[in-house]
Image: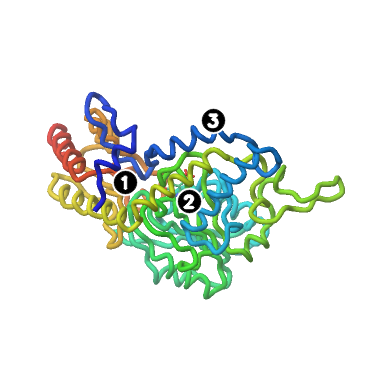
Amino acid sequence: MLDLEKIRAEFPILQQKIQGKPLIYFDNAATSQKPRQVLDALQQYYTSMNANVHRGIHTLAERATAAFEETREAVRAFINAPSAEQVIFTRGTTESINLVAGSFGRKFIGPGDEIIVTTMEHHSNIVPWQMLCEEKGAVLKVIPINDAGELLLDEYEKLLSERTKLVAVVHVSNALGSVNPVAEVVRLAHQVGARVLVDGAQAAPHYQIDVQALDVDFYAFSGHKVYGPTGIGILYGKLDVLEAMPPYLGGGEMIKEVTFAKTTYNELPYKFEAGTPNIADAVALKEALAFVNQLGQNQIAAHENALLAHATQAVADVPGLRLVGTAQHKASVLSFVVDGLSALDIGMLLDAQGIAVRTGNHCAMPLMQRFGLTGTARASFAVYNTLEEVDSFVAQLRRVVKMMN
Ligand code: PMP
C-alpha cells in the first residue's frame, strides 16, 4: 500500500489553500505537480553544475554532461528502449511528434501516401500530420470510435493498405481516459509495412511502458505529466528508422563537420538535438522517473484505478450527469457533462471551493464533435490524490448541480 500522507508531504504545492480551502488538484492530465526531489535537482543543477553540455573539458561541463546523459539512460530504462542513442530529448510530446512529421515525413511521405490517426487524438497528433499531408499531397484517414470511446479495430483494418505509411495513435486519451490496444494497432500496421507513432503523453505517468514489447516505431511523451519539469520531453525511435531520417533542426551539436561546401551530421541521438538543450530540466527529469520507480508503476496504477472506480460510482446518481468516455480499459480520467450546466460553470464553481478541474475541448475538438459537444469537465487523478478528495469533489459537484437547477 502507498503511504499517501508521506507522498503528499513531498509535494509542497499541495500544502496550500486555494480560495481559503485545501487545494484539491484534479488537473493532472494537463500537468502533474512536482515532488521535492525534482525541485531540489533543479536548484542543485544551477548551484553546482551549470555549464553547456558535450562541448567543454572543464569540470562543470563534465558534470553537466554526465548528469544530462544519466537522464537519457534513466529514460531508456523507464521505457525499456534497447539503447540510449534511441532516446532523443525534445521540449515535449508536441515537439517529438513534429520532429517525426518534419523529418520522417519529409523523407518518406509522398503524394497519395496515407497517414492514419484516430478520432480521439490530441491536436498535437493531428495538426502536424495535416500540415504534412497538405505539403506532400498525402491523405489523412481517421479510425472511428464507438460511443464508449473505444477504437473500432474492424474499421481500422479496412483503412490499412499498402498506401499507409504511418499510423499515429494515442496510448491513453487525455479527454476520455480510453486505453488503446497499442500492440494490436502496431501489429496490424506492420502487416502493411506502415510505421507506428504512439503519443504516450497520458500513458507514461500511469503505466509501465515497454517500447520493445509494444514494438512501436516511435514513442513520444512529456516530462511534465510524469512529475517532471515542463519544457523537456522524449522521442524514442527504432534504430533503423532514426538512422534513415534526416535531421530536423540544423545548428550546433547536430553536426560532425561543417564546410560551406557540405555538412556531415552527428550520430544519434545528437543528430536530432541541435542547439543547447534544456539541460536543467533534463537533469531534473531523472529524479521524476526515480520518484515513479520508487513508488512502483503498478502500485501507482492500482491507486489511480481505485480513485477512478470510486469517482465513477460516486457520480453515477448526480442528477443530469453523463460520463463522456466509458471504455472498458480506462485510466485516471473522469470526463463528464451535466444537463443544463456548461462545463465552464462547473469548473468555476468548483474552483471557488479549491477544486481544480479542467473544462473545455481538451485540445481534442474533432473528438468533441464526434460526441456532439463543445467541451466537458474533466477530473484527472495522480498518485497523490486521495479517496477523501474524491468524496469532497463529488459532494461539491452535487451542491453545484443542485444550486444551478
Ligand atoms: N497528447 C496528449 C494525449 C496530451 O494529453 C498532451 C498534453 N495535454 C499532448 C499530447 C501534448 O503534450 P505537450 O503539451 O506536453 O507537448
- Give whichever of 20, 402 is nearer the camera: 20
Left/right of residue 277 with respect to residue 174 in the rendered view: right
Left/right of residue 214 with respect to residue 70 in the rendered view: left
Say the numbered circle drawn on residue 215. none
The amino acid on which the numbered mark 2 sits, given as a three-letter code, is Phe
Q: Which residue is mark 1?
A: 382
Task: Kindly identify the residue that appears in the image at 66 percent across and 56 percent down.
Answer: 268
Which of the two marks, 1 or 3, is nearer to us in this view?
3
The amino acid on which the numbered mark 1 sits, given as a three-letter code, is Ala
- Give whichever of 97, 265 is nearer the camera: 265
Left/right of residue 32 with respect to residue 275 in the rendered view: left
What is the spatial separation of the Cα atoms under label 2 and label 3, in whole angstroms? 28 Å
Q: Of helix, strand and loop, which one carries label 1?
A: loop
Q: Is residue 211 above or below residue 131?
A: below
Q: How many marks?
A: 3
Say the numbered circle drawn on residue 47. 3
Q: Callout 2: few (<14), some (14-19), or many (20+) C-alpha neighbours within 10 Å?
A: many
- Confirm or deny contact between disc 1 and disc 2 (CB under 8 A): no
Task: Kindly identify the residue that appears in the image at 53 percent across and 35 percent down.
Answer: 45
Residue at the far bottom: name it: 191
Residue 62, quarter of the rendered image: top right
Q: Earlier in the sequence, mark 1 or mark 2?
A: 2
What is the spatial separation of the Cα atoms under label 1 and label 3, in whole angstroms? 30 Å
Q: Which residue is mark 2?
A: 221
The amino acid on which the numbered mark 3 sits, given as a three-letter code, is Thr
Does residue 167 appear anywhere in the picture?
yes
- Confirm or deny contact between disc 2 and disc 3 (CB under 8 A): no
Residue 380, quarter of the rendered image: top left
Q: Of helix, strand and loop, which one carries label 3?
A: helix
